[in-house]
Image (cartoon, rainbow, N blue to C red):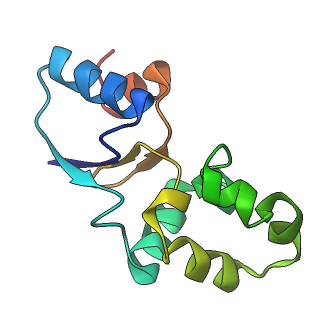
Amino acid sequence: MINVYCYSRCSTCKKALKWLDDQKLQYKSIDIKDDHPDEKTLRKYYKMSGLPLKRFFNTSGIQYRELGLSKKLPDMSEEEQLALLATDGMLVKRPLLVGEDFVLTGFKEEEWREKLQLG
C-alpha cells in the first residue's frame, strides 16, 4: 500500500490523486496539514528518498516565504531543517508519495510511473 500526503486545496495534489485513480492503484490519502509526518518519520523518508533535503520543502508555500527560508536554510543543520519541517505540514512539499522502499516529493508523472513500475 502506498501513502500519499496531500492537501485538499492543492491543485497538484488533486491532479496526482486523479492520476493514481486513473491507474487503478490503491493508496491511502493522508491530510498533510492535519496529520503531517513527525521528525522521526521525516528523517526516515529523507533517507529513503535519496533526495536533497531542500526537495522536502514547499518552496512556493506562504510559510516558506514568510519565514524567509530561502535565506535561512543554507545556514541550518540537517537536524534543524528536519525539526522545522516537522512543525507544520504546510512546509512539506506535496504531494509526498511514500512506498515500501521509496519516497517522492511533488508530482511528476514520469517519475511516479517509473517508481510505481507502470511501464
The quadrant of the image that shows the C terminus is: top left
Q: Residue 101: percent from the left, percent from the top?
A: 34, 55
Residue beneath the point at 50% across and 38% down: 106
Query: Is residue 44 positioned above or below 23 on the image?
Result: below
Q: Residue 58: percent from the left, percent from the top?
A: 60, 50
- Judge by depth and name the residue closer to the eye, 35 or 41: 35
The mark tally for this picture is 0
Residue beneath the point at 16% across and 22% down: 21
Q: Residue 65: percent from the left, percent from the top?
A: 73, 55
Q: Residue 79: percent from the left, percent from the top?
A: 65, 85
- Judge by depth and name the residue closer to the eye, 105 or 7: 7
Horizontal side of 2 relative to 53 (left or right) equals left
Horizontal side of 22 relative to 58 (left or right) equals left
Horizontal side of 92 relative to 117 (left or right) equals right
Query: Is residue 93 positioned above or below 26 on the image?
Result: below
Quarter assignment of residue 22: top left
Residue beneath the point at 80% across and 68% down: 73
Horizontal side of 58 relative to 44 (left or right) equals right
Quarter assignment of residue 40: bottom left
Residue beneath the point at 39% across and 78% down: 38
